[in-house]
Image: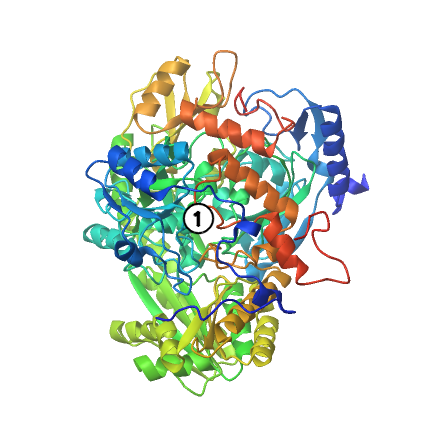
Amino acid sequence: MAWKRPGPPAQKQQDRYLAMNILYDERVDGVLPKIDKASLIKALEAALPGVQVLHEREDLKPYECDGLSAYRTTPMAVVLPSTVEQVQTLMRLCYERNVPVVARGAGTGLSGGALPLEQGVLLVMAKFNRILEIDPDARRARVQPGVRNLAISQAANPYGLYYAPDPSSQIACSIGGNVAENAGGVHCLKYGLTVHNILKVEIVTMEGERLTLGSEALDSPGFDLLALFTGSEGLLGVVIEVTVKLLPKPQTAKVLMASFDDIEKAGRAVADIIAAGIIPGGLEMMDNLSIRAAEDFIHAGYPVDAQAILLCELDGVESDVHADCDCVREVLARAGATEIRLARDEAERQKFWAGRKNAFPAVGRISPDYYCMDGTIPRRALPGVLKGIEALSERYGLRVANVFHAGDGNMHPLILFDANQPGELERAEALGGKILDLCVEVGGSITGEHGVGREKINSMCTQFKPDELTLFHAVKKVFDAKGLLNPGKNVPTLHRCAEFGGMHIHHGKLPFPELERF
Amino acid sequence: MDAMTASHDAAQALQDEVQQAIAQRQPLRIRGSDSKRHLGRPVEGIEIDARLHRGIVTYDPTELVVTVRTGTPLNELEAALEANGQMLPCEPPHFGPNATVGGMMATGLSGPRRPWVGSVRDFVLGTRIITGEGKHLRFGGEVMKNVAGYDLSRLLAGSFGCLGLITEVSFKVLPKPRTSASLQLELDPSRALIKLAEWERQAIPLAGACHDGRALYIRLEGGEGSVAAARDRIGGDALPATFWTNLREHRLEFFADPRPLWRLSLPNHTPVLDLPGTVLMDWAGAQRWLKSDMDAAALRHRIEQLGGHATCFTPDNEREPFHPLAPALLKYQRQLKQQMDPHGLFNPGRLYAEL
């Protein structure tokens, strides 16, 4: 997706998602301290001898965005420390000089959580890339934050162990970013999110203090700050070390693929599998557009005429997996599947999965650009939400392909558009915002695993009330009273919500009536 | 009393009480059935009784989610899940006939299955709380994956009511295992720990592992095939399944010892410890119960060196219930308390004198 944001955002229109830009806007996101670049660079170089401090335009270029590449900001400086002491020194210096800091891992995040600030330092943790310890008997690994997710499982493999959360970017994303985003993957229903699979994190706060959250034991005294910190999107502290749990690798895994002539039937089949008392390792759904795109690209053997397919992976001990396969097969047949295939061998299993795992790039082949959404819904709401998406797709004149972690209710609608057509990016974003509104309406969430970052900052105003956002801001103050760490991400200001709400007048009443307008 | 036996939404009444407490700057002691009152430090404050706010709000077994008011008796919730072949996988202890969901959430205690499936906090999906400003707010929700905003819901598990009055919780639930088998083996504690580490890496379907100094007690859960195969491999004699309830509820003979009771939370694979007193290992050694007159500071120092912490279940003037926090950590915990409960209303001092 190499494209630039075309022109300034459209002028205020009826559609509030079209009207509100997500780039940092001091008028609604809060005034940032003004920083003298030359003096900051001098101070950084003096305090951090031997540390890479980048500040020339061409050196900063690679860091101007993360996985949400539509949005780019050039940071004032990029710092690449390699020791914890250097991180502490940097944080103390920035705290004293009121310099905003944005931490970045591998930069694979999809919500702009590591989007830099022009008036700030980007702290890149890439040099913290060592696996410090693997203890097979205690089934845990202690790693630095820049270690890649997949590298942990590879290092644990000789002991028959692995690290369970597997976001689709796992070959590139780093564990520090996984903690910041509470990353998920395709096996969450059975194996949980990042928060369920870590024991301890070491962090450095904005004031440069080092803290240990959690412990090597299964719990620790006091409030559970590890739970609070996980998924806090780099707003509460910088991760400098992570201790993860390792699990024994499942003895065997089998995949069933079921085709349906109606997507609602596929949705009901998912509920039936759960009702039968089975928790699959993975349970994925794709609609016709995604099936065709994936088949065209990967040749996974998908039925291109099906309205939906379900991929159901059962893993564990051989005999249990056999029994579960028989049971699921029966459930699928009863639910009206038109075809049910069990991957004959490991090669075919990999092929079935390859289609699903490459669904995004596959869609990328049939459209110049696509925009990936991440809402979650109660599964029972699926038919209604799919109908709603179809209607929105028609209204905005953009195609939507649906890929769905059906087991845990996490939808990834892919909005197809062409950034070279004036206004299409804005339309895609507006359509995305409407889809998230729909998710919130049925009791779901605007983000299941990609995070809020900057991308969904406006949608937070839909999901939370002002009092709830106020409490989030209070929690932020606990760790960062000056608001210097990753400002503008994750939780919108009430001013932003007031502006955003102002675009959308409900029953003649303005939301946030108590706030000043400008 | 009708209100005590049926579903009843008392959120407004509770919120009024909190707002009155704010106006009068009067601390509150949040209570359910008081089954876990002996845990933590004593609290002085006006009693606010969550038990009027009760009943299951939504339960859809195929969504694997139940939302329940915190005054609901735990028995009632467990019976509703049982009727649908499901359970709270974390197996929370009751410690009394009328234990409530609120007490389970506030203490965050989990039972024998915990190392393999997760703790109370691991199954929390969403909460509603009455805050220190008297607002009734909602965090998280009824979906498995939700990373919008800070995760205040899981933070509240084990918070001992010190951050707000929890009125409603949504939990992820799971189907009950299709097969379960309980076994007893004659093995000394050290050999038992070695065996357990070996079985863990071989994906033996463990769901309970306890050693009382005499024998190793094992629970296996899963499909018929895996449980049968593991049972054949491990050997040993059959054990009544009630053993696990008795362990969870502290009804085994071990707990009758009059000496103070300590809970030691330790890293996996910590060896057998030579401590004065008697020890009961649970959670395959990650949770150990100790009956001992040992000096609190000396015990805590020893456990801390091992990477763990010690909680005293029979506190008195010499024995603080919770393990002291490192100064930097205490500072941030105090700031959290101040931000979430600025008037210091909720269970002041229950966890630590400073919180």
Furthest residue toward right: B1
Residue A358 falls left or right of residue A6: left
Chain letter behind tag 1? A
Q: Which residue is mark 1?
A: A233
Using the image as rendered, state which of residue A79 and residue A440 is in the foreground. A79
Percent across and percent down for residue A492 are 55, 50
Residue A263 falls left or right of residue A238: right
Q: Residue at x 24, y 54 (%)?
A: A151
Residue A26 makes an appearance in the image: yes
Q: Residue at x 40, y 85 (%)?
A: A303
Using the image as rendered, state which of residue A390 and residue A461 is in the foreground. A461
Percent across and percent down for residue B150 are 51, 46
Query: What quarter of the picture does the C terminus of chain B occupy?
Result: top right
Q: Residue at x 49, y 36 (%)?
A: A482
Percent across and percent down for residue A47 are 27, 33
Residue A90 falls left or right of residue B124: left
Q: Residue at x 42, y 62 (%)?
A: A71
Vertical position of residue B80 compared to residue B348: above or below: below
Residue A300 makes an appearance in the image: no
Vertical position of residue B335 compared to residue A297: above or below: above
**Is disc 1 placed on a helix, strand or loop?**
loop
Which amino acid is tagged 1? Answer: Glu
Using the image as rendered, state which of residue B322 and residue A514 is in the foreground. A514
Residue A228 falls left or right of residue A94: right
Instruction: Give the crowd class for mark 1: few <14, some 14-19, many >=20 residues within 10 Å.
Output: many
Vertical position of residue B318 compared to residue A76: above or below: above
Name the quadrant containing residue A257.
bottom left
Using the image as rendered, state which of residue B124 and residue A108 is in the foreground. A108
Query: What quarter of the picture does the N terminus of chain B occupy?
Result: top right
Percent across and percent down for residue B332 are 47, 30
